[in-house]
Image (cartoon, helix red, strand yellow):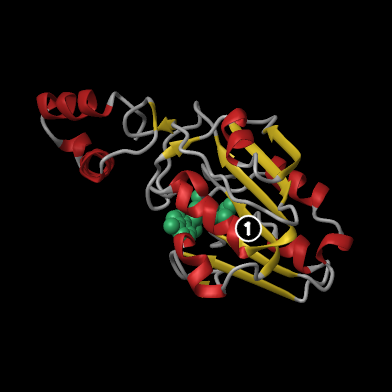
């Protein structure tokens, strides 16, 4: 059974469609948000390492299976240097970072000119799932705009559940333009460029409390928490 918010079979099929031996063999591959959080694991690591890259490095905020280096995605360039990898992959991570622009920018910068980026993420309508937080939902057109400074090879909706799959090439002579675009916030339920930290903190605290304790508390308090959270599923 699949747990919510992890690489699914359609994401895996999208990755396998584009990650051919010609693009992987002898190349340096980086996976961002690489922790294998489901059992059995559905991950691009197996199919990609079978294509014999020179190196496959998985990074994540937290240690665990599939993680070679613990490093926040915001700090990829400080960790590895610019233009260090031929292919940069990330499945189901972008919606979980507060500053998605910083992470997209880092993934673009750590990729070599002429290299490739593959990303899967979730769209509005996909349920709340905190790994460890859940901030954003992206439409296909959002990601077209976000990767307009790259060559679009495929930007598609997940045919199975709300989500988007991205496969782009960083051009030679790349000039970064990661736009100040508003995207759908899980905290405010509106498209926003950013959300104040305090608002996110209150939301995630209430959400965590509801999930852990609220079933046992008096109904008026339960109703209040549900009203503040907009009755999102726990
Ligand atoms: C929903 S899980 C997806 C895991 C795996 N990529 C998959 O598709 O099954 C999101 C992962 O992103 C990681 N993550 C969240 N914020 C991160 C950040 N700022 N930097 C690096 N990894 C992060 C989480 O620790 C978690 O392992």
**Left or right position of 48 against 108:** right
Residue 36 in the image: above or below residue 140: below
Residue 69 locus on image (x, y percent): 52, 74
Residue neighbourhood size for the residue with mark 1, other residues' Cα within 10 Å, grouped as few (<14), some (14–19), many (≥20): some
Q: Quadrant of the C terminus?
A: top left
Residue 218 locus on image (x, y percent): 10, 30
Residue 11 in the image: above or below residue 74: above
**Left or right position of 62 against 44:** left
On the question of residue 66 being in view, the answer is no
Between residue 234 and residue 129, name the one nearer to us.
129
Residue in the picture at 80% in, 55% down: 19
**Left or right position of 7 against 188:** right
Q: State the image quarter where residue 83 is shown.
A: bottom right
Name the residue tied to disc 1: 41
Q: Quadrant of the N terminus?
A: top right
Q: Is mark 1 within 8 Å of ligand 1?
A: yes
Residue in the picture at 20% in, 43% down: 198
Residue 13 in the image: above or below residue 190: below
On the question of residue 50 being in view, the answer is yes
Residue in the picture at 48% in, 71% down: 78
Say which element carries label 1.
loop
Residue 160 locus on image (x, y percent): 67, 31
Between residue 223 and residue 51, name the one nearer to us.
51
Residue 69 in the image: above or below residue 229: below
Residue 94 locus on image (x, y percent): 51, 47
């Amino acid at each position: 059974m699949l747990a919510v918010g992890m690489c699914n079979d359609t994401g895996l099929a999208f990755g396998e469609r584009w990650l051919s031996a010609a693009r992987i063999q002898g190349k340096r591959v980086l996976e961002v948000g690489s922790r294998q959080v489901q059992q059995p694991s559905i991950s691009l690591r197996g199919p990609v390492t079978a294509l014999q890259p020179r190196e496959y490095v998985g990074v994540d905020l937290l240690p665990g299976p599939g993680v070679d280096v613990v490093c926040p995605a915001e700090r990829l360039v400080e960790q590895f240097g610019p233009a260090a990898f031929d292919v940069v992959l990330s499945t189901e991570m972008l919606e979980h970072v507060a500053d998605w622009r910083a992470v997209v920018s880092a993934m673009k910068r750590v990729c070599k000119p002429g290299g490739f980026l593959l990303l899967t993420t979730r769209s509005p309508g996909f349920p709340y799932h905190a790994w460890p937080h859940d901030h954003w939902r992206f439409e296909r057109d959002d990601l077209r705009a976000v990767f307009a400074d790259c060559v679009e090879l495929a930007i598609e909706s997940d045919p199975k559940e709300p989500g988007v799959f991205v496969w782009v090439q960083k051009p030679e002579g790349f000039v970064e333009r990661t736009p100040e675009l508003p995207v759908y916030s899980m905290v405010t339920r509106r498209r926003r460029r950013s959300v104040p930290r305090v608002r996110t903190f209150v939301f995630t605290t209430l959400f965590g409390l509801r999930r852990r304790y609220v079933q046992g508390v008096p109904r008026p308090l339960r109703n209040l928490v549900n009203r503040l959270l907009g009755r999102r599923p726990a």
